[in-house]
Amino acid sequence: MGKKVKKEVEPPPKDVFDPLLIESKTAATVVLMLSSPEEEVLAKACDAIYKFASKGDENKVTLLGLGAVERLYKLISHEDPIVRRNAIMVFGIMASNHDVKKLLRELDVTNALLSHLVPEDVVIHEFATLCLAQMAVEYTTKVQIFEQGGLEPLIRLLDSPDPDVKKNSVECIYLLVQDFQSRAAVCELNVIPPLLELLKSEYPVIQLLALKTLEVISRDRGTRIILGENQGLDCLLKILETNEFNDLHVEALAVLGNCLEDVHAMQLIQQTGGLKKLLSFVGDSTVPDIQKNAAKAIAKAAYDSENRKILNKEEVENCLINLLEIDNDGVKVAASQAISAMCEDLSSKRAFGLQGIPQLVELLSSNNEEVKEAAVIALANLTTASPSNSSAVAEAEGIEPLVKTLNAQRDGAVANAAAVLTNMATQEPLRLSVQSHGAMSALTEPLRSTSSPVQSRAALAVAALGCDADARAELRNAGGLGPLVDLLHSKNEEVRRNACWAVMVCASDELTAVELCRLGALDILEEINLSTGRKNKFSEAALEKLLDNNLSQKYSQMGYLSSSNVITDGFYDYGQIKPGIKLLSLEELSMQELTDRRAIIFINAKPQEDVLAVEEKPQNSSYEQTTLSPSVSRKSSREKSSLMVSPVEEKQEPPGRRSSFSKSSSKEKGLRKGKGKKEEEKMIDGTQIISKVQDEINQENAQWQPPPDFILLDYINDASKTILPLTTTREQVVALAQFVADKMGGAIERDKLHDFSWELHISEIEYELKSNVVPIGKVKKGTFYHRALLFKVIADRIGIGCSLVRGEYNRAWNEVKLVDDSPQGVTGLLLPPQEYIVDLMFEPGFLMKQGSAEADQYKRI
């Protein structure tokens, strides 16, 4: 038998460690394992970290603090596919944390991730695209992915068999195309077909992301063309027709809205019946977001004129009007905006005018400011160049809410409310109705706005509504002239032009023109007109109109009044104004103390009903009247004793505070001398005092008026009776010159002009009236400028055309145009009128041809 041999087993090498199972419950230990040279350890450590990070954001922060991200970054390119896969999976999970994303960006992880989008493990594709999608929310990462060529592999992965890869890839592309560079690039990379294919996915989230991406890229015309060539419009319409896709209808409409901007796409949809289906779908839908997006789609399409015609043929107006009645503010806003866009088509404008205006007017009362703004913009477009629609707004009782909208919170609402009122003001009945609702007062605040569109539209509305005196008075009383004048300083050309226009209109009456001048409009307009870049036709017209309706200012500033500048009651000659000097009103001048300055000559030939006391005029027509100065009524209650025209009150009046234009009668002077204070006080009982105080209150509320000049009134009446009947203008001019000279001291010999003491005479009148303001009828010894002014005043009243020109050193003269007789022996020859200077001083009535030696000598000293 053989002998059994026992085989001995060799012991393992001394340098090999036996297999050891390590379990760890601390993240720090696992993170340390990421530095292991063993692939199995690395794979298990990555797997453990993936599970730990998946539990919450706090765990991600912990791993970040332990340095896990840097270690994992080294592993995403590991040669072992399992280690590489597990490391990328961790990045896909951890990239949702903001701080992790920041570190990944610094490590430039995108480049490494993109390198793994080649044909490889589907799991790597899933988590690599997940990481990229989460990082692509940051602009800098978008740039990195684009510059590193990431779009092409991402688009290729849209055909991946794995739905998660598709979802992550399309989401990443959606984020990337927010940037215009990527949006342009995806078209060249043929992204449309795979995106349309994704619309057939069984996963709604993928369909939704595909539609969102299509909505962004279809904003570019090139993409819309490609979309149409790939039957994309049919795809979108099918989604809208499928009820089970109702969660995709909003986004599908958004894409379709972009496509409808192109006429070609619009025609294609119309030809296939898709447009009718679309409008029907919108009408039947009860989902506000769908209705809103449909209205937005129509609005986008309506910006093209050809599209508007197509939409009008499909009666889109009915659809939009119905949307106005939907109880959703977003839908109302979108529908109003679509109506605004469609208004460019005249047929649509008429259709909306017949049906839609009442609904839009109703929206003006909405508590939602955005709704109110959209509605008033639509009304502004509807009423532009459409008198019938303007009338429809009035019939819908829209004037009151429009005026209220002038105080809305949104600038767009205010500006367009002013625009609607401007459009309505082109028709006189509507303008009067708008004015009756206090529109001018309401425009005061918009004029103060800091928004240029609001300022411009408000100024234009003032220009449109200011055609009537009542409207101008309302604006003036509401304090609107100040902010209007301020707009003349605007650097915005349109605002400045419209403000000039409004000033021109408002300067149509003297009261407003004077106030505008007081506020500095004249100086600003002069400055504007000196600038070639800032002046315009309206600024020039405004300056001329302002002066023509404020003749006192015009004559003081320019020293010239034309034959068309008719001097009326209230005019005063202040003298030449130096540049930069403001001309005070006659009321303000009448309140000033007596000074040694030149007398201010005023004109007022109309008797005033509010004169408190007027002495009987003597037969010789001298200016013997007692006139209580209206300026007294402006004084404080502590001076009310001056209102009681009695000896005791005259005596108590302090020096320098005596009523302007007043003159004490001889009877009053005698009373002051002959009676003591106690005896005088008995003349006024309590009833009289109460009556006088009441008179003061009444005068306080009355508008100030200068006292009447009865002597001037007599001059005008006498001239009308004696001069007006003369047969020729030449005769009338000569007779009037002689009449004026006779009333102001007669003819003066040239060499005795210096002896004509007119200055002393004027000073005596000023001292008598205790005022520098003198009625022209009081002047009995007048020099050149007194006579020329009186000549112009009477000539204007009796219909003789003449101008008034101020010269230097108290010189002034009148210029008249007369037709000379035909040369002897020539009949039927019509000669042009010649201009003459009228002599009122030396040979009253002598006519000197303009430019002649006599005329030049008359103008000089």
Image (cartoon, rainbow, N blue to C red):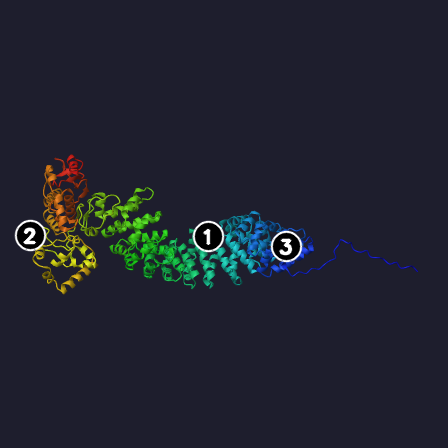
Nearest the camera: 276 or 710? 710
Q: Amino acid under label 3?
A: Ala
- The quarter of the picture where residue 837 lies is top left
Q: Which residue is mark 3?
A: 87
Residue 190, image x and y in percent? 56, 50
Residue 637 badge: none
Q: Is residue 392 visible?
A: no
Q: Is residue 441 visible?
A: yes
Q: Amino acid under label 1?
A: Glu
Mark 1 or 3, which is nearer the eye? 3
Nearest the camera: 390 or 783? 783
Residue 619 badge: 2
Q: Which residue is mark 1?
A: 261
Nearest the camera: 19 or 277? 19
| C-alpha separation, residue under disc 3 versus residue under disc 2 | 122 Å
| C-alpha separation, residue under disc 1 versus residue under disc 2 | 89 Å
- Helix, strand or loop for disc 2: loop
- Helix, strand or loop for disc 1: loop
- Helix, strand or loop for disc 3: helix
Residue 48, image x and y in percent? 64, 59
Q: Amino acid under label 2?
A: Gln
- The quarter of the picture where residue 645 lies is bottom left
**Disc 1 or 2, which lies upstream in sequence?**
1
For the N terminus, the image quarter is bottom right
| C-alpha separation, residue under disc 1 versus residue under disc 3 | 47 Å
**Disc 3 or 2, which lies upstream in sequence?**
3
In the picture, measured across the screen, residue 550 lies left or right of residue 77, that is left
Residue 620, image x and y in percent? 7, 50
